[in-house]
Amino acid sequence: MIIIDKEAAVASLINQDVVALFQGLGEIGPRALGNRSILFDPRNKHGKTIVNRFKKRENYRPFAGTVLLEHAKDWFDMGNIEESPYMLYSLPVKEDKIDLIPAIVHVDKTCRVQTVTEKQNKFFYDLIKAFYEKTKVPILLNTSLNLAGDPLVNTYDEAVETIKQAGIKYLYVNI
């Protein structure tokens, strides 16, 4: 396992590596909201298979996309929804964007969307923004930092153990 900074995290994601993210307090609930996450480049058409292999779970399971709020309406049909900070909505992906982010598009052409702002989660926001500046895609595939059947990681030691078990090489940390 290698602990990396933001620039290395972005480079690793662009290089099609899986990156684990660990920061701040643990999250409550069924979703990874940017404190305990496994991240990947949503542009990779094999992204679901790659990340599901690391998570040791069934291949049909879909993934969410975390998007910078200011770009959400460019990528997703948000309807009357202004934001989705808790990943509660599966929203249609805009037709002209489907092929740009295949790793997070479900079979029904939707995506479970999490919006993020700098105020909500600066560390995570800054990572996605840096990825956007390099790729013109303001979104990362985001899933919980755990393996199939395990609870969400809570402590740093649990994160390290999970990453070792999964075979994930890179950890982006803000402790």
Image (tube, rainbow, N blue to C red):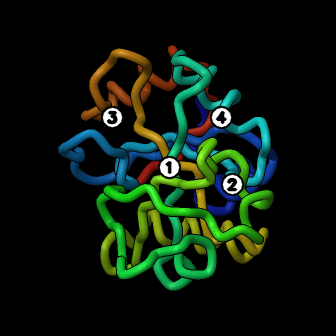
> Which comes sooner in the sequence, label 4 or label 1?
4
Q: Nearer the viewer, residue 95 or 114?
A: 95
Q: Secondary structure at mark 3?
A: helix
Residue 157 seen in the current view: yes
Q: Which residue is mark 2?
A: 8
Label 1 amino acid?
Answer: Ala
Q: Which residue is mark 3?
A: 156
CA distance for labels 4 and 2:
22 Å
CA distance for labels 2 and 3:
20 Å
> Which comes sooner in the sequence, label 2 or label 3?
2
> Which comes sooner in the sequence, label 3 or label 4?
4
Q: Dots 2 and 1: beta carbons under 8 Å?
A: no
Task: Report the side of 152 relative to 98 (left or right).
Answer: left
Disc nearest the viewer among 2 and 1:
1
Q: Dot 2: few (<14), some (14–19), or many (≥20) neighbours within 10 Å?
A: few
Q: Position of residue 67 (x, y in %)?
A: 52, 68
Instruction: Indicate which disc residue 64 carries.
Output: 1
Label 3 amino acid?
Answer: Tyr
Which residue lies at the image location 42% right of the left edge and 62% below the top edge?
Answer: 114
**Vertical position of residue 131 compared to residue 162: above or below:** below
Q: Quadrant of residue 19?
A: top right
Which residue lies at the image location 52% right of the left edge and 18% below the top edge?
Answer: 57
CA distance for labels 3 and 4:
26 Å
Q: Nearer the viewer, residue 78 or 38?
A: 78
